[in-house]
Amino acid sequence: MAEFKQLLKIPEIVQVLNKINIDIIDEDITKPTAQRVFYIYECMVNYTLGIRYNDLTQPNFEIERTLEYPELLKDSLPLVSFYELISKILKNVGIDSFSFADLINPEPNQLRRYLSAFVQFTYFEQKHTKAIYEFKNKTDEYDNIINDKQERIEELKKKIEKVRLEREKDEIEAQKIKEFNNELINQNRELKSNQDITANNISKLKSQKESLEEKITNTKLMINNNKDDCNRLRTLLVHNPEEFKNVIKNLNNTLNEKRHQSTITDKRIQELQTNMHKMQALKEIINECIKSIQECQENFNEFKSYQKKASDEGEKVEKVDSDVRNLTMENDQLDQRYRNIEEMEQRVIKKKNENTKNLEIKMNQLREKYFKVRDGYVLKMIDSDKHRKSVQEIENQTITLKEQIKSDMAAMNSAYNKLKSQVDCYLSEIQVSLKENI
């Protein structure tokens, strides 16, 4: 934290500190005493941290167990803790140069500077507390919104994954249906080509059947005519045998020809019957082909319905994709905000770590000072014990010397009195002798 430099007027400092129930006057700053400064710092610690000096004087057995000489140091622990609390408060308000001497032997300028920093921090806290709490509440709201959005994004990701899997399944089924439909289309094409060929064969067979039926009718007419001729010949009596033989021979020839024609006709009829059987089988095949074509049409209709469903599902998927894109954009914005917040948090953590490092450095320095003071205190205690012993010895010697001096003084007084009496006698005698001589 930067070193504090701005100073306030003493009346301003006194006015603000009186408002926060710190009883202080101008002379406490212009002419500070250790007792009044201790009281002011105690009120500052109580105002900011809610800790009084009496709370620090309570024995802490855990700390005492860690000390090497707890009996010697336990009286100084509350004061050291109190100094650390004041240092912490003043560091937070921009003062880094506070020392233990400022607590024991305060100076007016330094005290005014420290109190100016504390007063301005108090004024700033009172002025901006509402805004700080508002920003804190907004930050909490944004954190809740971010958490809700992240939960929503996770849910949508799960839904998207589910839709994607369903879509893959539907695509696989649609691919199978397409393949099956292509097979049916190929079969339908083959059946249509076979149907055309069969229709041509049927038309040819029908024309052949009609021609054969005409020939059969003509043959039947010829047979009937031959029968009529036979009957007519039977009725005729020929008196000439040679002519009759010739006629019979001719009739036999014609009959043989007719028989030959009838055998040919029978063969043709048999061929027509076989062709009719073939046509019947072909009709059955055509009916089966028609049934398969109908099935193909039904499958094609089902494929169209599946295709329509697939298009509907595709529209739904596109809609979900658009929602996902929107959510992705929102997620990116939230990620950006989250990154900004993380950067702010990292800066705060970095600043906090720096402050912690500085505090640790100060604590290490204070600890070193404390150990030095403790070692000096121990040495001084040893010296004081030696000094106490020497003082005790000197006091004992002084008592003996006083007694000797008293006895010597008594002897000297007695000798002095004797000497004085002798001197008085000598003086009186001298005066008498002088008078006599005069």
Image: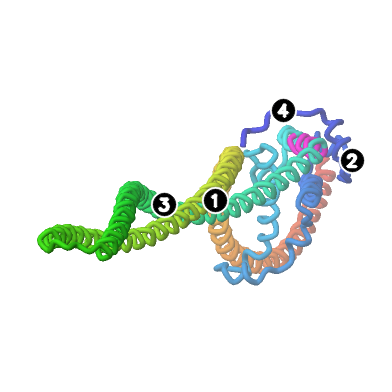
Q: Mark 1 and mark 4: span between their CA atoms?
A: 83 Å
Determine crowd level at label 3: few under 14, some 14-19, many 20+ residues with C-alpha closer than 10 A: many
Determine crowd level at label 2: few under 14, some 14-19, many 20+ residues with C-alpha closer than 10 A: few
Type of secondary structure dominating the magenta stretch: helix
Q: Which residue is mark 2?
A: 19
Q: Secondary structure at mark 3?
A: helix
Q: Secondary structure at mark 2?
A: helix
Ranked by sequence position, the earlier of labels 4 and 2 is 4
Residue 124 falls inside the magenta stretch: yes
Q: Which residue is mark 1?
A: 305
Tell me where the magenta segment starts and ends, as one range: 117-126
The residue positioned 25% from the left and 65% from the top of the image is 234
Determine crowd level at label 1: few under 14, some 14-19, many 20+ residues with C-alpha closer than 10 A: few
Q: Mark 2 and mark 3: span between their CA atoms?
A: 91 Å
Q: What amino acid type should be assigned to the residue bearing mark 4?
A: Gln
Q: Position of residue 194 (x, y in %)?
A: 32, 50
Horizontal side of 62 relative to 33 (left or right) equals left
Q: Which residue is mark 3?
A: 181
Horizontal side of 208 relative to 382 (left or right) equals left
Q: Is residue 276 above or below residue 59?
A: above
Q: Do we see residue 184 in this rendering?
A: yes
